[in-house]
């Protein structure tokens, strides 16, 4: 928010709560007199004839609760584990393998980032219908992502090793800056798909099957 960085899950100044809705659950973070961030997780199936609940739709709502216009931005960090014991940590929808730190600015070419141990896979779908395209996606050691700059400063091609975090890879998703008027909300949508028993995650196929429509952004219920 402005020039201040808030680690929503860590900072003591950020209030945190969880709530269950009829068809989803939400993590709710509140920066007093500045912003409320609601992360809504809905579990769905890739296709109607598939009874497996194999996709999580993630809607993130950022609301300006101050009385002033504010410039904000958002990033999400996932500490992945499935690829850490494999020949390569990540691969993309186009089957391009990633074995070392990398910064991706052309996510439309990759579409998704997958971490897999061969049996179980997790897929972050970051481009496609209804998805809000990130500005930068960084794949690097967890400490480099969590403890570094807002947009991680990495040396492409270096290993995922650090002295205190061996072979520890993570995904950092940075969205573009945006301006919000007082009480205005910005929403971001992406999907997390899973595959088990060696099956391929179907996140990209699911997104491709959707109509490219804009959801109506409604400010989530405020927490007191």
Image (tube, rainbow, N blue to C red):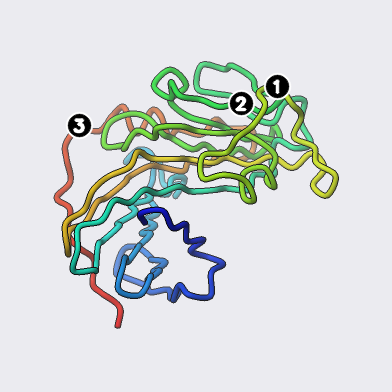
Q: In the picture shown, does residue 204 fall above or below 150? A: above
Cα–Cα gap, marks 1 and 3: 35 Å
Q: Residue at x 42, y 73 (%)?
A: 18
Q: Are marks 2 and 1 in contact (CB under 8 Å)?
A: yes
Dot in front, 3 or 2: 2
* Horizontal side of residue 110 vs 165, given as left or right: left
Cα–Cα gap, marks 3 and 2: 29 Å
Q: In the picture shown, does residue 197 fall above or below 64? A: above
Q: If you read the primary sequence from the N terminus, does the residue marked by circle 2 or circle 1 appear first?
A: 2
Q: If you read the primary sequence from the N terminus, does the residue marked by circle 3 or circle 2 appear first?
A: 2
Residue found at the very far front of the displayed protein: 3
Q: Secondary structure at mark 2?
A: strand
Q: Indicate the position of residue 29 as horizontal and vertical percent values.
A: 40, 69
Residue found at the very far bottom of the displayed protein: 224
* Horizontal side of residue 57 vs 181, given as left or right: right
| Residue designated by label 3 | 212
| Residue designated by label 2 | 102
Q: Which one is nearer the viewer's eye here, 202 or 27? A: 27
Q: Secondary structure at mark 1?
A: loop
Q: Indicate the position of residue 34 as horizontal and vertical percent values.
A: 31, 67
Q: Are marks 3 and 2 in contact (CB under 8 Å)?
A: no
Crowding near the residue tagged with mark 3, few <14, some 14–19, many ≥20 C-alpha atoms within 10 Å: few
Q: If you read the primary sequence from the N terminus, does the residue marked by circle 1 or circle 3 appear first?
A: 1
Crowding near the residue tagged with mark 2, few <14, some 14–19, many ≥20 C-alpha atoms within 10 Å: some
Q: Residue at x 35, y 38 (%)?
A: 176
Q: Secondary structure at mark 3?
A: loop
| Residue designated by label 1 | 157
Q: Are marks 1 and 3 in contact (CB under 8 Å)?
A: no
Q: Quadrant of the C terminus?
A: bottom left
Cα–Cα gap, marks 2 and 1: 7 Å
Q: Which label number is shown at residue 207?
A: none
């Amino acid at each position: 928010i402005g020039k201040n960085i808030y680690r929503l899950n860590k900072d003591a100044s950020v209030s945190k709560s969880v709530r269950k809705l009829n068809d989803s659950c939400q993590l709710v973070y509140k920066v007093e007199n500045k912003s409320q961030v609601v992360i809504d997780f809905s579990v769905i199936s890739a296709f109607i004839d598939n009874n497996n609940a194999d996709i999580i739709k993630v809607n993130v709502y950022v609301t300006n609760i101050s009385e002033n216009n504010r410039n904000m931005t958002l990033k999400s960090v996932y500490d992945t584990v499935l690829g850490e014991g494999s020949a390569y940590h990540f691969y993309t929808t186009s089957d391009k393998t990633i074995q070392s730190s990398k910064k991706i600015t052309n996510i439309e070419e990759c579409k998704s980032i997958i971490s897999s141990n061969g049996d179980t896979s997790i897929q972050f779908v970051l481009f496609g219908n209804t998805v809000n395209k990130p500005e930068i996606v960084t794949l690097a050691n967890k400490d480099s992502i969590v403890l570094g700059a807002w947009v991680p400063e990495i040396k492409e091609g270096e290993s995922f090793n650090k002295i205190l975090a061996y072979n520890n890879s993570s995904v950092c998703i940075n969205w573009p800056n945006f301006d919000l008027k007082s009480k205005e909300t910005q929403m971001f949508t992406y999907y997390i798909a899973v595959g088990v028993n060696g099956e391929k995650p179907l996140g990209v196929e699911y997104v491709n099957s959707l109509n490219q429509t804009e959801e109506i952004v409604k400010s989530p219920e405020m927490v007191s």
